[in-house]
Amino acid sequence: MFEFDQRLKAALVGGAIGDAMGAPVEGWGPRAILASFADWDFTRFIPPQGWDGKSHYWKGNGRITDDTLMVEALIDAYIESEAHLDAYGYAQYLLPRIVHKDVWVPEYQKTMPIFDRLWVPEKYPHWRLTYNNVDPRSAGVGNMCNCGVAMWIMPVGAVNVGDPLGAYQEAAAIGQAHNESFAVEAAAVLAAAFAQAFAVDRIDDVVESAISLARDGTRRACIDAIDAVSLGDDLPTFIHRVRDAVAPYDQKTEHTSDDRPLALATGTPSDIGRPSRTKSIEELPVALAVLKYGQGDFLRTLRAGVCYGRDCDSIAGMACGLYGALHGSSQLPDTLCQALAETNRRDFCALANRFEQTVRRIVDADLRRMHQRTMAMRIEPDFTA
Amino acid sequence: MVEESCLRLAGALYGGAIGDAIGAPVEGLKRQEILRLEGPVSGFIRPTERSDGQWIFCDRIDGKGDGRITDDTLMVEALIAAYLEKGAHLSAFDYREVFAPIVARRMIWLPEHQREMVLVDRLAGAEQLQIRTLLRSPHDPRFFGARLHTITCGAAMCAWPIGAVHAGDPQGAYDAALAFFAPQTYSFGLEQAAVMAAATAAALAPGATAQSVVHVSLSLARDATAEMIGAAVEALRPGADRDTDLPSVHAAVQPWHHKTDHVADHDESDSAPSGQLRSEDAGLESRRHTSEELPVALAMLLRADGCFDEAVCAGAEYGEDADSIAAMAGTLAGALKGIQSIPDDWRRYCDRQNRRDYRGLAIAFGNTIERICQLDRQRFQCRLDALAADMSYRSGDSSR
């Protein structure tokens, strides 16, 4: 069993590796990725694949994207608050960091607030909270439901290490400031998965824990995605079967096919992003399936997450983050870890160390609260570790 | 749950029911009207009615008055029933799947109507609509409260059982109430419920006082709710009588009161007897306005130093939403001092008039609470194990 500090470091670095590796092929279909990268040496980062004609930033060569930038911001928020967070905590600690704090943004190659790097739905909370004075607990209502909360939720799992229900509840409380419906549900389920992953050794325990707490379409999508995993399948077959399993839950399905990026003509009626009890984000169930398919082999996990395509930076980020929480860092290639640190000008190990101290202080405070409850119940307190 | 904790739980249950019953027949009246009708409130009040613009007593075996509980206590009973049914913490999904069906479908003896019926039919319009719609709605329960059309104190008035489940942990009670009532309300309606749950958890802690309950409430409350509580308790004068304190508190809470028209300039001559006009923004979401029931209840608790009789009767005499104010004050006073602080004959009268056995209910609820706490201890042990920390904790040893 690995120590928590190793797991935390590996979750952060592993997640960043997945994000950075998947980024240059984000939006591609699996056929196109496999055609180019089936034999890629995944101990090296995929380089930029050319300017996509839309964005102003360069993904590739190990550059982290908004997923990891938001993870860093949340860790920072926890370090400052030294307490559990909720919707008000989002407004007080996280939002100012997103909007005002200057960080080195690798894709833009400059120091700037991460707000300017975020996609539109992730800017919604700023409008709702800062300009429109909405109560933080309902600020997320009306947003476009996507993976924009789940993609940075790992730290909530860390703070609630060993307590998936607590992680689920806290992620939902934080997430309400940002989004609603299945976007918040996915974040809650993934936080629970991380909380369990930090505490156990078996992939199946993580998956079971996540599914047991999940609700509605998110739950069913996770169940179906996991059921579609057959360890003996080759990579293209795995990808195909998992995609088939999650397609019915994906609001984009009717508008797109495997290898064509989503490009709706203006005015096309669509339910993409609308709240739903039957739909799910795609990234979470696929990430769980990738984790299972990876069977504790980091490169196999990374390759599967990236080659799935579509939102593969988030998928690989989630899957590899979970990998790290479960299995630690022994299989994380040195080449990737070094390139990651250099390219992004980050010391992820130092950040993980500081965060770990914060997690322990939060648990300390929770221990005192638990003691107060047992005193109120007149039960003899006898916690030992 | 050991004897002493159970006595305080029973105190909360009787305290809330008695407060509700005392305040109910003078709900909606101004304090001056109550003094004219009844004089200073000192116990249960007979049924009242409005006749020729005046409030008078009447003889009836149904309706408010004569110790009969109202929707406040009925909703508390439903929430306790939900906990008994689930045997675990209640989430927003449980609100929809466990609590709402109890409210909408379980037949209970309803004292004001003197017959068996479902609770939902007794609820006020806004709350009735919310629960009925929720049960038919495709919306995620966690976000349904934000689609509400009007905010009331309907969540705060029945939130205290959540505090009891988290006795000793006000932060936990606060968070749990926010999660549970999300399908019912939002904005200050949700905030009030969370603070009431936290206040109850604080009141049930060993060594709790009226001061500690108010202090905890202030430390956790947000926005206008925090400000109104602060203003209400600041308005009290040590040793002052009701004639001094009650009007003072009433005036102090106005700047944040959601029902008060803060905009219109009105002529003294054509204002209502209370001197305020009802705002068209009443019940609208806001971070600058809130409702007065809990802040006033806390003030009543504080000025009575937790003494049950005075907290409840002064709360009822305040008027306005008198049943909710007296119920909340009674709940907190009863939790602080236990069932022993409530006059025996009041408790017997309450059980008899409502055909209830609140002592039995408190015991059953106490058993469930203890079970939930044990489950939480097991969950917490998993966290400690995962951190492999040297965190052995002995009674009285708060350092590591």
Image (cartoon, coloured by chain):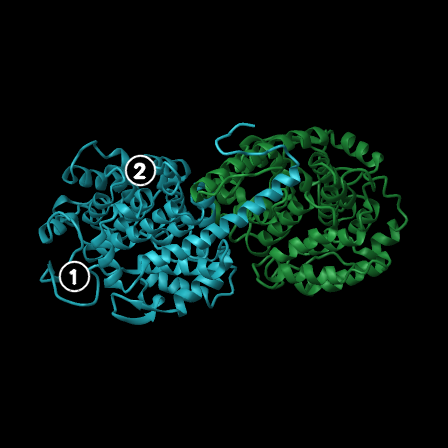
Chain colours: A green, B cyan
- Residue type at tag 1: Pro
Q: Nearer the viewer, residue B341 or B332?
A: B341
Quadrant where the C terminus of chain A lies?
A: top right
Toward the viewer: A88 or B77?
A: B77
Q: Earlier in the sequence, mark 1 or mark 2?
A: 1
Side of B199 where B385 appears, left or right: right
Chain identifier of the residue bearing label 2 in the image: B
Pinpoint residue A117: horizontal percent, then vertical percent.
Answer: 65, 39
- In three-dimensional space, the C-alpha distance between marks 1 and 2, rounded to whole angstroms, equals 31 Å
Q: Chain of mark 1?
A: B
Left or right relative to B129: residue B271: left
Looking at the image, residue A358 sits to the left or right of residue A20; the answer is: left
Look at mark 2 in the image and give the residue it sits on: B210
**Residue A20 has which mark?**
none
Q: Is residue B279 visible?
A: no
Q: Position of residue B200 (x, y in %)?
A: 37, 45
User: Image quadrant of residue B305?
Assistant: top left
Task: Describe residue A73's horizontal placement relative to residue B51 as left or right.
Answer: right
Mark 1 surroundings within 10 Å by alpha-carbon count, few (fewer than 14), some (14 through 19), many (20 or more): many
Residue B47 is marked as 1
Taking depth in this image into account, of B86 and B101 the one nearest to the observer is B86
